[in-house]
Image (cartoon, rainbow, N blue to C red):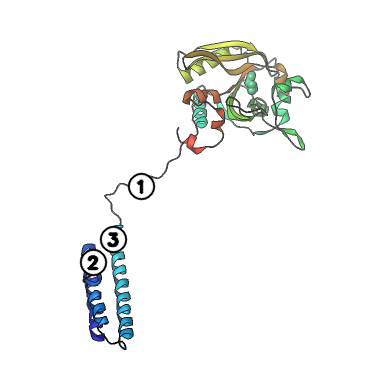
Amino acid sequence: MEHDLSILRDDSLEAIRVARSEAELERVETDLLGRNGKFAAAMKRLSALSRDERPRIGKLIQEVRRTIDQALADRKRTFGTHRHTFDPTLPGERPVRGHVHPITTYSRRIIEVWRSFGYDVHEGPELEEDWYNFEALNFPKDHPTRDMHDTFFIKGRPDLVLRTHTSTVQARSVFHRKPPLKFVEIGRVYRHEATDAKHESTFTQCDGIAIDRHMTMAHLVGTLHVFFKRMFGDDVKIRTRPSYFPFVEPGIEMDLQWTINGKTEWLEMLGAGMIHPNVMKSLKLDPKKWNGFAFGMGFDRLVMLSYGITDIRMLYNGNLDFLKQF
Ligand code: PHE
């Protein structure tokens, strides 16, 4: 019986080794371990043995069985790995691609138009000196004009604020340069306001400035008209209204006509005006020699209209499910 078992083991291992396909291996397995297989036959012979012999031979049969199980499993794995080898005919796996935020898309479009008019693009810090945000722009200290902006102040640093507008660029970028100058700045601004679908404490503005000799309101209004036409097409309807900002004189606001859900409305787009002589003096420029215009627009609302976004907070909360749609 021992001899028969060692032959069974050697034959089985050989049959497993030479099996050339998974199907063939399956046949070998049935032949060995199936209900009418060689192992079943060996077990039957075990019951015919004497009580003394049974435990020893039984143990031998189990050992042979373990060896064969192991050999079958190993061989199966080699077929398995063959199936997963590189197949150049399968389609590739595409890496996930990101894309820019809708605000960035819009910023780039706006910058492209201003660059085509010969404007430079400047940057400034979001944590700004009070002087650049207010003082240099003719908002005197403790004057009620400061209440126009609900400001985030910095604890222990009365000289710093989170900038409330990108008009800071007027003072920052002009101070160390010589006119004639023209440039824009795009960036985030912050106001301490209650937030809702239409208001967020963080939003995005684009300010611009042009300083030269003999600049007029006609230059300002004409430039902004061309800008809006380049952005939205020649048919865009523009309205100009007088307004007040401490750093310009005279000041204006411009509205664009939009049709939203079948309703036609004027939407406020920007503030602008001729740079106030006091601002020129803060910048150490002689207002008799130099003058210019400035404008500042928030464009979150335009982004929302273009994409049909109904809640401004979606633009700033980093929700990927939302952002992946663009
Ligand atoms: N900074 C102003 C605002 O945030 C807009 C503005 C810019 C007005 C430049 C006039 C000139 O509302």
Q: Indicate left or right for 79 with 195 as reference.
A: left
- Can you say whether 221 is above or below 4 in the image? above
Q: Which of the pair 139/275 is nearer the observer?
A: 139
* Residue that badge 1 annotates: 93
* Residue that badge 2 annotates: 25
* Residue that badge 3 annotates: 82
Q: Amino acid at mark 3?
A: His
Instruction: State which tag comes first along the sequence, 1 or 3.
Output: 3
Q: Is residue 212 visible?
A: no
> Dot 2, how many residues are within 10 Å of its Cα: few (below 14), some (14-19), or many (20+)?
many
> Dot 1, how many residues are within 10 Å of its Cα: few (below 14), some (14-19), or many (20+)?
few
| Numbered disc 3: secondary structure | helix
Q: In which quarter of the view is residue 244 placed?
A: top right
Instruction: State which tag comes first along the sequence, 2 or 3.
Output: 2
Q: CB of residue at label 3: within 8 Å of ligand 1?
A: no
- Furthest residue in direction bottom, as rendered: 52
Which residue does the image show at 24% across and 85% down from the upper left? 1
Which residue does the image show at 50% across and 34% down from the upper left? 101
Tell me whether circle 1 and circle 3 mark residues in contact (CB < 8 Å): no
Q: Which of the pair 2/73 is nearer the observer?
A: 2
